[in-house]
Amino acid sequence: DDPADDTKVYLLSINRNEHDILMRKEIDQLAKDHPNRLNVSYSLTGKDVRSDWEGYIGRGSVDMAKNALPPPSSSDGKTTMIFVCGTDGFRDMWAGPIARAPPLPDGSKGPKIQGDLLGVLKEAGYEAS
């Protein structure tokens, strides 16, 4: 623990159903133990969301990004880094498509390369770095 480190982590976990949320109990405990360092939001995309569900509903939107994620990097030196993982369609919707670098000398697939920033994050004001 570095007292000078004021890094904040925001987690937006989007799942089909509540029982699909990996390590929810542990993540919620971490957020409770570190309220000034970890902000957690959940969204469900399934058909049978409980009527008392307190999280978001849907795969994502500009409003969801603006409310659940930190603001884009600013001129005051605060840097925001967003990581998106999921299926190709989900990732494309949030951040735009990726491509592959040429195959490696051993014939295996080349590494994935993020293309231009598009999608929800671009519409919400984030920029590629």
Image (cartoon, rainbow, N blue to C red):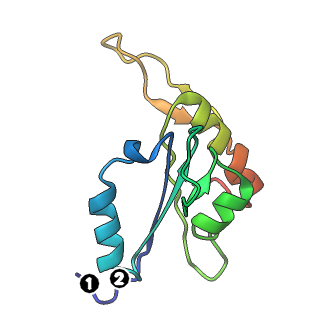
Disc 2 vs disc 1: Cβ atoms closer than 8 Å? Answer: yes
User: 105 or 55, which is in the foreground?
Assistant: 55
The mark total stands at 2
**Left or right of 128, for residue 30:** left
Residue to which mark 1 is pinned: 2
Where residue 95 appears, x then y in whole percent? 63, 44
Could you tell me how far apart the alpha carbons at marks 2 and 1 are, in whole angstroms? Answer: 5 Å
The kind of residue tagged 1 is Asp
**Left or right of 81, for residue 32:** left
User: 124 or 19, which is in the foreground?
Assistant: 19
Q: Is residue 78 above or below residue 127?
A: below
Q: Among all residues in the image, which is located at the extreme right?
A: 123
Q: Is residue 112 visible?
A: yes
Under circle 2, the secondary element is loop
Residue to which mark 2 is pinned: 5
Where residue 79 appears, x then y in whole percent? 54, 71
The kind of residue tagged 2 is Asp
Q: Is residue 129 visible?
A: no
Where residue 128 appears, x then y in whole percent? 64, 53
Q: Is residue 14 above or below residue 73?
A: above
Under circle 1, the secondary element is loop
The structure residue drawn at horizontal position 53% and vertical position 34%, both measured from the top left corner, is 113
Q: Quarter holding the C terminus?
A: bottom right
Mark 1 surroundings: few (<14), some (14-19) or many (≥20) residues within 10 A: few
